Image (cartoon, grey):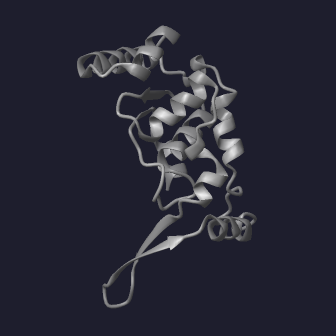
Amino acid sequence: MRQAMVERTDARIMLGGRVVGHQGKYPGILEEACLTLGVAKPLYLIGSFGGGTRLVIEALRDKQRPEPFTRDYQANHPRSAQFTKNGGMRITEQVPLEQLEESYRKYESDPLIGEGPVDYERCVGLFLNAKIEELRNGLSEVENLELFETPDLDRIIFLLLKGLTKVFE
């Protein structure tokens, strides 16, 4: 689903985002940021709301690997799987990381389902090795640094509109 979304969008604006208790391969913000950076589409990171976006910023700007974006941390904080059983009963189960990893290994060569293995090192490494200009968002480095920090909503909107206008003019 996230891969399809990134293919059908022109830019990604990110803020907040949970880092534990998620249902997917990675916390959603991390996965979407990796996919967006990987296809060189404009990426806007608003850090004042904390969460996963703040951690992506730490990796990109500060060149530090955030602990919640490590395999060990994720293994100690299982994700949740939610599904509906026959009869309409909604169920939530904890899914250990090892079970998720095995599932991705099992199906990675399937031509319909195939995805790479769960690899926090690779995913976070994209940001540890990237430069701010690789966000390709029409903002200067100074403007991106401001977007990473400012709590001023008017300024956030101004920066987003400035970047989007520049990218899509």
Question: In front: 12, or 73?
Answer: 73
Does residue 65 appear left or right of residue 168 in this picture?
right
Q: Position of residue 156 (x, y in %)?
A: 31, 20
Residue placed most toward the observer, 108 or 119: 119
- Residue 115 is situated, as x and y percent measured from the top left of the image, at 67, 58
> Can you name the residue that lies furthest to the left here?
154
Looking at this view, name the residue that lies furthest to the bottom.
87
Q: Is residue 123 left or right of residue 53?
A: right
Position above or below: 61 against 92: above
Looking at the picture, how far across and down is residue 93, in whole percent? 46, 75
Say if 37 sits above or below 158 in the image: below
**Which residue occupies 53% across, 59% down?**
77
Q: Position of residue 119 (x, y in %)?
A: 69, 51
- Work out whether 156 lies above or below 79: above
**Residue under the image location 68 percent in, 62 percent down:** 114
Residue in view at x 46 percent, y 16 percent:
144
Please indicate whether residue 161 sits to the left or right of residue 39 in the image: left
Name the quadrant containing residue 147.
Answer: top left
Which residue corresponds to the image point at 54% horizontal and 21% vertical from the top-left?
Answer: 136
Q: Quadrant of the C terminus?
A: top left
Between 24 and 136, the residue placed more toward the observer is 24
Tag count: 0
- Does 87 sit above or below residue 68? below
Q: Residue 85's quadrant in the figure? A: bottom left
